Image (cartoon, helix red, strand yellow):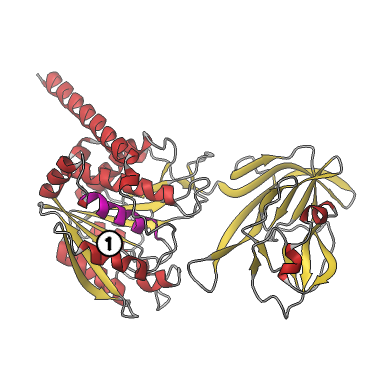
Amino acid sequence: MIKIIFLSLLILSETLMAQDIEFANNIYFKYQNYKEPTLTSRRFRQSDILPLIDRLREKNIFSVNKVGESSRKRPIFLISAGNGKTKIFLWSQMHGDESTATGAIFDIFNFLSRDDEFNGFRNDLLSKVTIYFMPMVNPDGAEVFQRRNDFEIDINRDAISLQSPESRVLKDTFDSLKADFGFNLHDQSILYSAGHTFKNAALSFLAPAENFEKTISETRSDAIKLIGKMNNILSSLIPGHIAKYKDDFEPRAFGDNFQKWGTSTILIESGGWKDDPEKQYIRKLNFVALVSAFNCISNQSYKSEPLETYDNIPFNEEDLMNLIIRNVSFKKNGFNYKADIGITRTEFNTNSCKDFYYKSSVEDIGDLSTFFGYEDFNFDGMEIQIGKTFPQKFNSVPEIEKLNFKKLYDEGYTNLLIDSSVFKEKFISLPINLKYKDDEIGDSNMKIGDVPNFIIKKNGQVRYIIINGFLIESENIPTKFKNGLLL
């Protein structure tokens, strides 16, 4: 009898898993029907979403309430849907430059209010759960696309001190809801890999610890099981691209304390994907992950997931770089040798938070066989040289735009001189760097931390050029480029 009951439960669990995966695949392929078309990049301000929030007031399934203000008096909203007993609370963008999940939340609003083949699911879901959303906890940080708030405080280290108005709004809302499940939505570096592999961590999950001992209480156990379920579902779409965020207890963080205070809390960190600089594919994965999680909570299919599923998710590892060139030949001090060069890129805001430029740096030189690149090239048989600065000074950018860049590269130049009175920017959208003065200290001087500007030759002929860490083929030089630098 016990064996029959066990087999019956196993069959039921496998059936529910198959149904959950089928549901996730269906909404994955129908996602474009729900994607909010006014949000097309990561860099948006609260003024971009206020019209969308106003639009929700016109739909009878949503309740929209202002629950507080930021230090600069920008409103913070709580939006809810459903009337079920189980409460789910999602908050996003407590770090102002981590906006991927905020975009996904507005996609979810479109999904919940649509009239289509998922009506049966919506009606069942919203009768069983009530979902509360707090998009953009940190609107002041979002305004200038920075992590911290206007006080320069990291809101996610203010759960106990509660010195920021945004922190108090989040804590007061949590106290008033007493939610069963919480989703803490963030972005992480795109340079994390899923374990020690070449696969980037597209999404990373965590059931935050409640204490330094990492006790698994019933509250945390439910979060662990739900993450295990989400991992299994998403692995059908992005196998090998899911990781686990470090699980050290952080006593000042909201997620850790919300877990401690009785809400089963799931951290979702949005990572990277090749050729997705604006994280629009990662936004889609957030949409699928969250709606699938709602489904699993509603049908309680997460309850049968073993804790071992979560344990087997690999941790984030820092094994990725933006660009790796391998086996390139060097000549220095009479020595000939080969090495790999790893390059990483950092974004810097322009005067408008809606635009940015890149500054790259040489991250490492040597044997990088344990690292992987989003762009990864084997240049065995090729020789590298540091780019030089052309001695003639130019007086305008239009003058530079007319130049034959291939000819410059063939002569070994990656930098130009320009008059400081006519160029005040920090970058240029051309495949060349600018300098105010020629301060070269020798072609053999390559150091960790340098801006990578190289000429790569094979049999004496220029094959590739690296300008500010971006690889260019000598026979395919772009007219628009993101971006050269003022060095």
The residue at 86%/39% (across/down) is 459
Q: Nearer the viewer, residue 194 or 135?
A: 135
Highlighted range, magenta: 99-112
Q: Position of residue 27 (x, y in %)?
A: 29, 40
Q: Which residue is mark 1?
A: 257
Res 164 → quadrant: bottom left
Q: Is residue 364 visible?
A: no
Q: Position of residue 227 (x, y in %)?
A: 30, 44
Res 367 → quadrant: top right
In the visual, does 229 lie left or right of 343? Answer: left
How would you rate the neighbour count of disc 1 (Cα within 10 Å): few for under 14, some for 14-19, many for 20 or more?
Answer: many
In the visual, does 121 lie left or right of 274? Answer: left
Q: Was residue 106 drawn as part of the magenta stretch in this picture? A: yes
Q: Position of residue 234 (x, y in %)?
A: 35, 39
Q: Nearer the viewer, residue 355 or 186?
A: 355
Q: Nearer the viewer, residue 401 or 215?
A: 401
Q: Is residue 369 visible?
A: yes
